[in-house]
Image: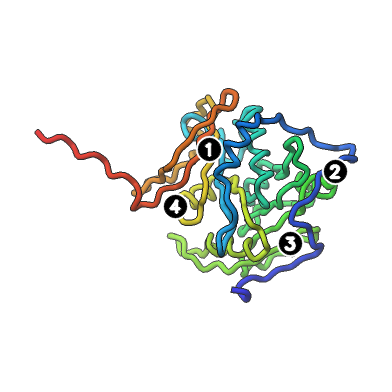
């Protein structure tokens, strides 16, 4: 396993960074949840597994199951309270993971701005195809330089021959050995999570984008908790759906709970394996 990963580190970043209290560009804090709402999220949070981090898969969607208005665009769905819940959840994790396309399109902060929580988790950018362009101008790097976020970890393919990011980031290169339907190779999630575990990351909150979420919906063995924010709005068929197309074994949740935050509804649960999913009731005869 050790030989599978090749790292290049230009400046060793800490696992998590205290938020600065002196910078003139300090980002505003979120709203605060009630004690009962905080407890709702804390009570099902657990420690790392033996060979991988604890994995929370989370996203916000519309009532018709869309996570964005159109491909390649950013769509704001979370309300004030559910956004606060997202930042509270970040405070419970040691890392936040997004794909390179999400990092490019949304330019997210990937930090924690929840009141009373002074450390931000480590951003992880999964970017095997190098779609994260000009990272030196990204919000996450700007905030890291201002001590308002941690410096990111960038995951690439081991056969990537692109130029090294000459920034205070860490690159982890992982062998692409899983075949796609079109014959291309991609990085296995087992290896990604093993690499994070090797970096002493005990828990990771995976926030998208769509292709990452779809991949992990097929891997209930790797996802410990699913948290979905459902906004009271419809986007329409031009939107970006979260559900995989044409799946013979659609993902489903068990141990489902609900919490209303403002006008949003947050659903939590665990993915069911195909053997655990209930069979449809028999059709009546006659």
Is 26 on the left or on the right of 114, as rendered?
right
Q: In the image, is residue 7 above or below residue 141?
A: below
Q: Which of disc 4 and disc 3 is earlier in sequence?
A: 3
Q: Residues within 10 Å of mark 3 (few under 14, many from 20)?
A: many
Q: Is residue 138 visible?
A: no
Residue name at image x 35 percent, y 50 percent? 276
Q: Which of disc 2 and disc 3 is earlier in sequence?
A: 2
Q: Which of disc 1 and disc 4 is earlier in sequence?
A: 4
Q: Residue pushed farthest bottom?
A: 3
Residue name at image x 67 percent, y 47 percent? 103
Nearest-to-viewer mark from 2 and 4: 2
Is 215 on the left or on the right of 195, as rendered?
left
Q: Give 57 or 70, whichever is nearer the viewer.
A: 57
Tell me the element at label 4: loop
Nearest-to-viewer mark from 4 and 1: 1
Q: CA distance from mark 3 to mark 4?
A: 29 Å
Residue name at image x 49 percent, y 65 percent? 178
- Viewport quadrant of the N terminus: bottom right
Residue 218 - label = 4
Q: Position of residue 169 (x, y in %)?
A: 76, 58
Q: Residues within 10 Å of mark 4 (few under 14, many from 20)?
A: many
Q: Which of disc 2 and disc 1 is earlier in sequence?
A: 2
Q: CA distance from mark 2 to mark 4?
A: 39 Å
Callout 1–callout 3 Cβ contact below 8 Å: no
Residue 20 - label = 2
Q: In the picture, residue 227 is in which quadrant? A: top right
């Amino acid at each position: 396993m050790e030989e599978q990963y090749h790292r290049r580190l230009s400046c060793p970043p800490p696992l998590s960074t205290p938020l600065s209290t002196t910078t003139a560009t300090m980002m505003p804090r979120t709203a605060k949840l009630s004690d009962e709402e905080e407890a709702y999220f804390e009570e099902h949070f657990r420690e790392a597994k033996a060979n991988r981090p604890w994995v929370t898969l989370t996203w916000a969607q519309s009532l018709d199951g869309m996570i964005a208005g159109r491909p390649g665009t950013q769509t704001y769905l979370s309300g004030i309270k559910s956004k606060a819940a997202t930042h509270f959840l970040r405070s419970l994790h040691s890392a936040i993971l997004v794909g390179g396309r999400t990092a490019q399109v949304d330019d997210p902060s990937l930090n924690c701005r929840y009141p009373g929580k002074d450390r931000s988790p480590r951003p992880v950018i999964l970017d095997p195809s190098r779609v994260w362009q000009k990272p030196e101008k990204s919000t996450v790097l700007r905030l890291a330089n201002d001590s308002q976020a941690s410096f990111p970890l960038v995951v690439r393919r081991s056969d990537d021959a692109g130029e090294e990011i000459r920034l205070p980031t860490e690159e982890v290169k992982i062998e692409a050995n899983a075949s796609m339907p079109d014959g291309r190779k991609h990085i296995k999630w087992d290896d990604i999570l093993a690499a994070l575990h090797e970096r002493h990351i005990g828990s990771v909150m995976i926030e998208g984008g769509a292709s990452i979420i779809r991949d992990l919906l097929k891997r209930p063995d790797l996802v410990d908790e699913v948290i979905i924010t459902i906004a009271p709005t419809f986007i329409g068929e031009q939107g970006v759906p979260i559900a995989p197309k044409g799946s013979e074994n659609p993902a489903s949740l068990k141990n489902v709970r609900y919490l209303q935050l403002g006008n949003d509804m947050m659903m939590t649960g665990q993915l069911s394996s195909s053997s655990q999913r209930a069979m449809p009731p028999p059709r009546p005869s006659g």
